[in-house]
Amino acid sequence: MIETYKNMTPKIGNRVLIAPDSIVLGDVTIGDDASIWFQCIVRGDVNWIEIGSRVNIQDKCCLHVTVEKWPLLLEDEVSIAHNVMLHGCTVRKGALIGMSTTIMDGAEVGEGCLVAAGSLLREGFVAPPHTLVAGWPAVVKKELNPEQRELTASIWQRYVKYKDAYAQEGRIVSFAQSNIDQLRYSPGFPRN
Ligand SMILES: CC(C)(COP(=O)(O)OP(=O)(O)OC[C@H]1O[C@@H](n2cnc3c(N)ncnc32)[C@H](O)[C@@H]1OP(=O)(O)O)[C@@H](O)C(=O)NCCC(=O)NCCS
């Protein structure tokens, strides 16, 4: 479901998949070939949210922001695994956020990082690029080894393919521009 709020309508790129039971609302921009899976909330009501190209946001994620202070930025090719809570944070290109992680206001995850499943990144926490971050609260463990780099780089690519497979079944929402009249509807995606 794509919702306008206070005249702010999400701007959604081409070939983007948004599951029908997810909500994308307000000042949200989503790049080409991104995917937002089932039961997610992307609530850009009191600040902006930007989601880069080829980003995947897996099932049951919640993305929100803090008024006037902390917007939310996910750069290209980021993977957000199932059941993640992102609040007013920045995730740099190609990072993987493991399942059931929480990331708080002002935290920044560096390019290519792997955040282990079940981590808590406290306010303002900074993860240097290509490091493994883990724990509740999280600490920087070490530089990623080759297997961990491979895992981190593989997931966003897989999810572009998964999204395309769903698209072949008619399950895709795509805007040419940020204009709700330009939605191409399909049976899987009722209009509101
Ligand atoms: C991080 C992960 C890849 C494990 O990697 P690994 O190579 O087995 O990790 P290591 O054995 O090198 O562990 C390094 C350190 O991190 C710790 N660690 C690893 N995973 C952890 C986790 N999930 N939570 C807390 N600490 C963790 C280890 O205890 C170790 O700590 P130490 O050095 O203080 O002893 C795995 O736990 C993980 O979270 N994968 C992501 C899963 C996921 O969400 N996938 C997306 C689904 S699409």
Image: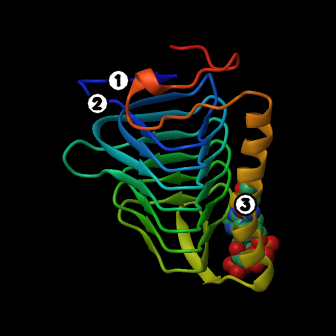
Q: Residue furthest left?
A: 68
Determine whether, in the image, residue 83 is placed left or right of residue 123. right
Q: Are marks 1 and 3 in contact (CB under 8 Å)?
A: no
Residue in the foreground of this view, choosing between 177 and 135: 177
Residue 112 x/y as whole percent: 59, 74
Mark 1, secondary structure of its residue: loop
Q: Amino acid at mark 2?
A: Met
**Distance between the Cα atoms at labels 1 and 3?**
30 Å
Quadrant housing residue 89:
bottom left
Mark 2, secondary structure of its residue: loop
Above/below status of 53 relative to 177: below
Q: Are marks 1 and 2 in contact (CB under 8 Å)?
A: yes
Residue occupied by mark 3: 157
Ligand 1 is within 8 Å of the C-beta of the residue at disc 1: no
Residue occupied by mark 1: 4
Which residue occupies 55% across, 77% down?
140
Q: How many other residues sit within 10 Å of disc 3, few (<14), some (14-19) or many (≥20)? A: some
Residue in the foreground of this view, choosing between 25 and 148: 25
Residue occupied by mark 2: 8
Which residue occupies 80% across, 79% down?
147
Q: How many other residues sit within 10 Å of disc 2, few (<14), some (14-19) or many (≥20)? A: some
Mark 3, secondary structure of its residue: helix
Determine whether, in the image, residue 91 is placed left or right of residue 146. left
